[in-house]
Amino acid sequence: MDYGKFKYESALKARESRKNQAQTIIKEIKLRPKIDPHDYGTKKSHVERFLRAGDKVKVTIMFRGREQSRPELGFRLLQRLAADVEELGFVESQPRQDGRNMIMVIGPHRRKSEARAERATRDSHHGERGGSRARAADVAAANVAIDDQPVAPPQPADGAQPAAEAQPAPEAQPAPVAQAAPPAQPKPAPAAQAAPPAPPKPAPAAQAAAPAPSAPPKPAPPRPSAPKPAPPKPGPRPPAQSRPKPEAPKPKPPTRPKPEAVAAQARAAASRAAAPETGADS
């Protein structure tokens, strides 16, 4: 017995057995008792996708605050979810309270290996369909290309000549021209239908006397306007030294006081000097 061959065959069998086995994975989805309808629909679609893939789903309801006193809300929500995915899975573990959370486990109806095999067959079917479509498209494109090519006329054999060249077509003979009829002779007009006499032409002298039509007068060319005289330029200013300096005013001679005014001043001074003496005596 060959031990190496036995070991190789056992390894092949173990590999084949591992191919058919599938590791169980538990997916988890978390909900709240007051979840919105649209959010609930999204969570439900995720659960359906997990069950189709052959995985188990662990659904968790989270209670916060005063929601812990109303566990029936979470129980109703779990029952509703189990009823919606009844076609894809079954309730493997009934809802149970675990502290602030309520947990339920949903298992798929079929194994993961079966789901994987079905997915592989579906992918191969889609691939074959896509390949057939691609081939049909290529054939249609080739047919269109063939139809678009111009068709060449059939070429005759080497020894044969085309019928058109072998028997030349007879030339077309011109049709006989009909003989023209002789022109009819004009009949003489009767005397009654004679043309009226032409009016007499004016004499050449009268024609010379008639004045010739006068030609329209040509407009006279505009006269150039006389240039305006330029303003006179100011002459050069005389230098500062040439200007005459103003003469300084002459001092007036001192006027002598009149004798009458001098006498009056002397009298006033004498009267002022006598006044304090009279005040002291009194």
Image (cartoon, rainbow, N blue to C red):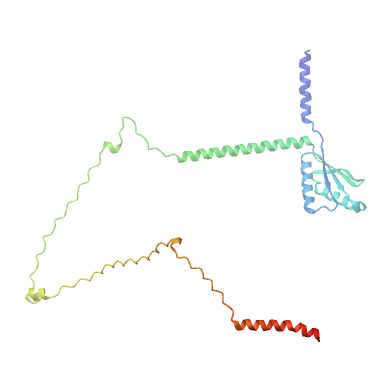
- Where residue 195 sits, quadrant-wise, is bottom left
Residue displayed at 78% across by 23% down = 13
Q: Is residue 28 visible?
A: yes
The one nearer the camera, 16 or 58, is 58
Location of the N terminus by quadrant is: top right
Q: Residue at x 45, y 61 (%)?
A: 241
The C terminus lies in quadrant: bottom right
The quadrant holding residue 47 is top right
Is 229 above or below relative to 149?
below
Identify the residue at image location x=66%, y=38%.
Answer: 126
The location of residue 59, given as percent across then percent down, is 84, 45
Q: x and y percent of residue 30 in the render?
A: 83, 46
**Residue nearest the observer in this picture, 222 or 169:** 222
Q: Where, by quadrant of the figure, is residue 125 drawn?
A: top right
Residue at the (68%, 37%) spot, across then down: 123
Nearer to us in this view, 219 or 94: 219
Residue 157: x percent and y percent? 34, 31
